[in-house]
Image (tube, helix red, strand yellow):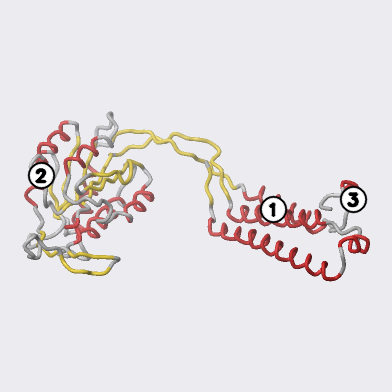
Amino acid sequence: MYQLEEKIYLYVLLIIPVIWLLFVVFMAWRKRQQAAFANLDLLQRLSPNQSLFKIILKTIMLSLALLFLTIGLVNPKMGTKMTTVKRQGVDIVFAVDVSKSMLATDVAPDRMQKAKQLMSKTIDELGGDRVGIIAYAASAVPVLPITTDFAAAKMFLQGINTDLLSSQGTAIRQALNMAKGYYDDEQANKILVILSDGEDHSEDVVSAAKEAAKEGVKIYTIGIGTEKGSRIPIKRNGRLMGYKEDKDGNTVITKRNSKILKEIASVANGKYIDGNKTGYVVDYFKEILKNTDKSDFETKQYADYKDQFQWFLGLGLLFLLFDIFLLEKKTDWIKKLNLFR
């Protein structure tokens, strides 16, 4: 396992193809100038020690020197051993609604961004816990398998939007079934957090929540939006094109359905939370995680990363010295081989 500490220096490697391009251009120009000056036999008599092989070799040495010096600047680090870290925590999976109704702006800036903000701030409060993310609309897709890498979780979270799934609807049952597969069988503390406006849930959602509860999954639901509701904007390339209409041409108003979200939480030993109060939601989950019994689980990770830059800097300087002290004239044994005649 390795890490690259300063990846920005990798752009320096773009100089290498530029060097070779300039080399080819220079050699073509030199050949034309020589041809205009004298024929090949005369040139070989005038400069018998001129070596094309040495010129190419010096360019190779310069390229290798630049390559290894750049890698040295990047500072690769190697994991010297694998350690097993025992953690205590809970498994918390977020299932976020990405249907188009989540674009409604009855909460600022819109329901989708509000849900992502709530997830991000809750992840900030996690300790030795593990987190996973599922997105759902007419179907459910895994966004992030359960992990202790909270930085990765927040990175994947940024990519969630209402264009993630082309088919629209609210397949919460599929999200529930997928979530059950996220948890370890022996993990006693399983928490599922559903973030949704509650619209368009099918009638069998409550029964699906009961099935999840039987397997030890505690479900908390967070309602996003308002009871008054709002229009659903239609956007293309970030530009507002209009608002969603029904088949009769009337503007569709999407409203938060708190009732179904409360039912889901109630049958799964959880609680419904008003998602419009960000501070309250974060504080509530902080308290939940604090008071929930922690389960032991093991996480394997590489440890003791050591710097390796010195090896590459040494090789780079070595090839640079070769390039500096390597003469372009033929040596006796090269002359005998008669390369690149």
Helix, strand or loop at mark 2: loop
Sequence-wise, which precedes: disc 3 or disc 2? Answer: 2
Residue visible at 89% across and 50% down? Answer: 335
Crowding around mark 1 (Cα neighbors within 10 Å: few <14, some 14 to 19, many 20+) is many
Q: Which residue is mark 3?
A: 335
Quarter of the image for residue 141 reads top left
Mark 3 and mark 2: span between their CA atoms? 85 Å
Sequence-wise, which precedes: disc 2 or disc 1? Answer: 1
Q: CB of mark 2 within 8 Å of CB of mark 1?
A: no
> Which of labels 3 and 2 is toward the front?
3
Crowding around mark 3 (Cα neighbors within 10 Å: few <14, some 14 to 19, many 20+) is some
Sequence-wise, which precedes: disc 1 or disc 3? Answer: 1
Q: Position of residue 161 (x, y in %)?
A: 27, 56
Q: Position of residue 10 (x, y in %)?
A: 57, 57
Crowding around mark 2 (Cα neighbors within 10 Å: few <14, some 14 to 19, many 20+) is few
Q: Which residue is mark 2?
A: 202
Q: Is residue 86 left or right of residue 192?
A: right
- Residue 64 — which label? 1
Look at label 3 and name its amino acid.
Lys
Q: Is residue 121 left or right of residue 332?
A: left
